[in-house]
Image: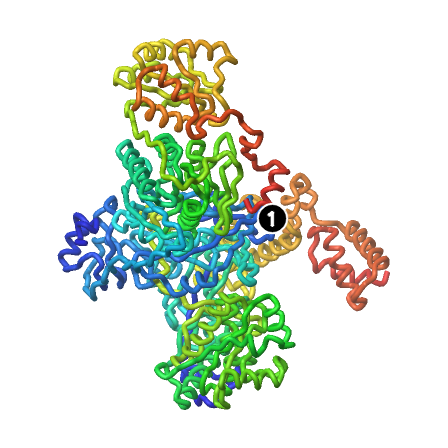
Amino acid sequence: MNFEKIKSFDEMTDSDYQALGFRAGFEFHQQLETNRKLFCRCPAPGQPYNNKFHSEIVRTMRPTPGETEEIDPSILMEYRTRKEIHYRINRDTICTYDLDQTPPFEINYEALDIALQLCFIFNAKPVDEIYVIRKHQLDGSVPSGFQRSALIGVEGSVKFKGKDIAISEIILEEDTARKINDVHHKRTFYTDRLGIPLVEIVTKPELQTPTEAMEFCELLRNYLLASGRVRRESGAFRFDLSVSITDGTRMEIKGIDKIRKIPIVAYNEVVRQLNLLRLRAELFKRGISPETFSFRTYNLYKVLKNTNYFPIARALENGDEVHCVLLPHWAGLLKWNTQRYSVFAQELSDRIRVLACLTDLPNIIASDIIDNTISREEIDKTIKFIGATEEDAFVIVWGSSDDVKIAIDEIANRAYEATLGIPAETRKALPDGTTSFERYLPGPNRLYPDTDLPTIIVEPARIERIKITKPEDFAQRMKWCKEQQIPDELAKKLALSKHYQLVKELAKELELSPPFVAKVLIGSFQWLERRGYNLQELSVEKVKEIFRFYQEGKILDDGIKYALELILKGKEQYLSSLLSPANEQEILNAFNHAKVTIKTTVIRHPDKLKEIAISLIMEQLRGRVKGGLIKQFVEKNWDR
Amino acid sequence: MDLVEGGYKGLALEILKNFGIDVWSEVKLKTQETEFVGIVLPRSQKGDDRHIVLKLRNGYNVGIKVDKILSIELLGQKETKPTTNFRERLHDPRKPTVKLNSTGGTIASRLDYRTGAVVPAFEPEELYEFIPEITNFCNLHTEKLYSVLSEDIGPKEWIGIANAVARDIEAGYHGIVIAHGTDTMHFTSSLLSFMIQNPPIPIVMVGSQRSSDRPASDAPLNLIYSVKTASESDIAEVTVCAVGPVSDSYGLLHRGTRVRKMHSSHRSTFRTIGDIPLALVSKEKITPLRKDYNRRRKDRAFNAKITFEEKVALIYHYPNMKPDVIEALIDNGYKGIVIAGSGLGHVNNQLYPALKKAHEKGIFILMTVQTLWGYVQMYVYETGREIMSLGVVPAENMLPETAYMKLCWTLGQTTNPEQVKEIMLTPIAGEITEREPTNAYLIFQGGIPEIEEFISKLRM
């Protein structure tokens, strides 16, 4: 594909992506459904996300040399930001372990078993001896400064469109805290999900188009849901997308909130990488290479001390400094397109927002986009002061002296990186499908052995037990649904449902048709959940009992959900009232009642009065009569 | 490090040897199921002989069962880096010069990849390479006196530490910091308070609850606070310096004879018992909380009394305690017993004859309270009077550990019961206080609405 002309998102074809050498892979994060957290005995609540907190604590983190005496660049970067980390603590689910005041308890074996089960679902090989390690997180997302994590399985795969997509790692770890705020040198986290068992599934970069990536993500999510052992709330499943092209760099993109946004985010990253490669070519043309790259810096206080440009005027008033980085022969390149709606200067701004904590935007002035900032006279004075020629570009930055020092370094550093190509970064997805810098891509040097816990030898007996109890996976479930002629849409719902096994059992035990049981059970459960009932309180035996009533002809199919509702309400004694079909008189009473209701209420859809009447009658008779019968009755008696 | 030093034995050792693989080798290892590429790590010596530990390229460690291994191919050798070369620091004549003596403990610990445990290894020089802020306050001289964990500190080290402190005061240091394990730090701080009396400079003990290889370790803050105190404060006493609240906001300076470790793992483990701490210490300033402390002086005069008697026991009374415990001490030639008694200072009446016998044998018996807070008061109940009549001496509100160290120290000077009693009951370094202020006993109970409201605002 020609670098000069980049096709729009809609114009891109699979072969275009192929020509670019597009590759995508994933890190999936899925919370497991366990009663307790991974390394402490705190409850892992059914709905962990809430903003309730009782107290707040503050911490600062420091990098530490580890096993190999090396410190990961992403760790050093975080340290340079000198962030003060605030944690909001809900004492119902946070204990002194979570705050690193108590050593870890033994690993949660329920979580370990689920992780091992996922290994089998994804055809991965469990490791023989599990080592818990510390994954250092200096961004503050864990109050101890590290996340406890363990490699459980390797070398798995998932069948996808006739190929095997390789899964390189299955990892069990504790979930991190949730960042809610990050301004200047203060960063705040909620700790509601901290410590909840989480499985990280890492794929190899084998997906060849953005659409394939999206479809694969969907499929993997389906496998996880169909395992029946994972959390289903929003936020319980998250993923990082990694994207690269030929000559490009692997980029990790976090925080894509919807699976359907994957193609546009991936496309935008492709565009960004192509544009950055073009930028490098342009720099070479201008004689700027890693060897010849240069920059100069100036303190602009004298030039701008009386400026009316508000951000700088305010900064100087606060005793801050204003500086300038001159980039020789860079004229015009600061407005070089990178992403849709975005230019190279944005990359500089992003960097210093994150690394120098200059979070008040705008945080720079780029000479190529200088209109509506400082005055023409100030621009001229600046150019003269720094000795810039028409071929040069410059970036003005302001802030406290410590922050500006880092900002100058980072501006020069990011500009230098443009001569190398595309720096390896973790980027954050924005709502419009573009991305912004989050941190340097972390490497293996941020993993340290954990000395607080013994290793876990995975005994063959444990493996055997898990293999035996392994549930049918998504593909097997779909296959069964197909064999039973369950319609496609219902089949998918059933395969992802927690109640798949129950449907199968009911159909078999009571010799009912699987499509019927699936439709009624899934339909009834959805109906009950919408009404706010907690299905956990419903025992399998009770459900079976109700279906047995149906099978014995004591109850109509439409009555099943009402019977289940009575049980959930704790009014089982009234069950008998549902067990006899409604007689003509009852139907007539309900019909009359419905007509009164319709007359006395404002009806939004006057054309659907009959349908409304039918549903009112059904509601009142609570499934003791077939829907078809009521329809007939209404048709017959409507005009009476 | 060879394979045996690296913790390998038996089958695992044999297999590695067969394939010519050493610890820290980078290898490609094929098993019946899959293939791993990684570095062979040392194995815990308590581990079995059936697994080989690899650090994979993704940074994770895994153990691989030896009987699954088909082949191991050597790819290269990872160089274990030598310890960092420390930059020479120039002496800044405008700053005071402080001495940091390290005795071991978590604050002076690092990971041992062989045993997988935290072991004393951190060289004192590394501390300020790692925490450069320390040099903002002073020129720091460091010395490794010992490398022992808390529980292994004993008379030899105590006497050694006291001698080192005496020598460093005479050498003209502006302040002294002593790095020490936290578990028994209050024993050492008490004893030093008695051995080095009326010092002209701050003597600050410091430790940490989290080893320095963790990003949220308390070691850096504790060191910063303690070095700042030694450099700048005018509190010339033996003190313990440690983080105060849960948040990283300030440290507390505790008097060496009134401090106690109160939590097995919490960072805010040290508390002043029965009184308030001496001062708050932040990175910016030191705020004294009281006025009755020994001030810093320019002279080098102090009173060193470095004596110690080892045959002293500290026993914790419990109902059903049998006299044979006391008898054993008598039979083994003990010269002093400190009892952490029940309530106001009581023991069960089965023990009376044994205590009487001990007293008659010349054993000095001191009563303290296991409640930690409060005074021994042996007149309130008749039983208390009876116990005193057996020769047991009540020790006011001296903490049991402090009383224990003081008795060891006193019996090293004299065994004359009258003299021992007089020394024991004459306060030297705040070990006995005349009064308990109303804010000296504050143990908040969670759950109480006003406390919950208070801590929600306090950042704990």
Image spot of residue B143 (x, y percent):
29, 46
Q: How is the image coloured?
A: rainbow
Residue type, mark 1 in image: Asn
Of the pair A276 and A82, the residue shown nearer to us: A82
Please report the residue visible at 51 percent of the width from the left and 56 percent of the height from the top.
Answer: A84
Of the pair A395 and B324, the residue shown nearer to us: A395
Please report the residue visible at 38 percent of the width from the left and 80 percent of the height from the top.
Answer: A420
Residue B18 location, quadrant: bottom left
Measured along the vertical axis of the image, is residue A153 above or below residue B354? below
Image spot of residue A29 (x, y percent):
46, 60
Please report the residue visible at 39 percent of the width from the left and 25 percent of the height from the top.
Answer: B403
- Point out the residue furthest to the front here: B299
Residue A510: tell me if it is visible: yes
Quarter holding the N terminus of chain B is bottom left
Write down the residue under mark 1. Answer: A534
Residue A513: tell me if it is visible: no
Q: Chain of mark 1?
A: A
Instruction: Look at the numbered disc 1 and give the secondary structure of its residue.
Output: loop
Quarter holding the C terminus of chain B is top right
Measured along the vertical axis of the image, is residue A258 above or below residue A66? below
Measured along the vertical axis of the image, is residue A240 above or below residue A573? below
Drawn side of residue A127 relative to residue B73, left or right:
right
Of the pair B437 and A305, the residue shown nearer to us: A305
Image spot of residue A606 (x, y percent):
81, 67
Please report the residue visible at 43 percent of the width from the left and 68 percent of the height from the top.
Answer: A440
Residue density around tag 1, few if under 14, some if 14–19, many if 20 or more, within 10 Å: few
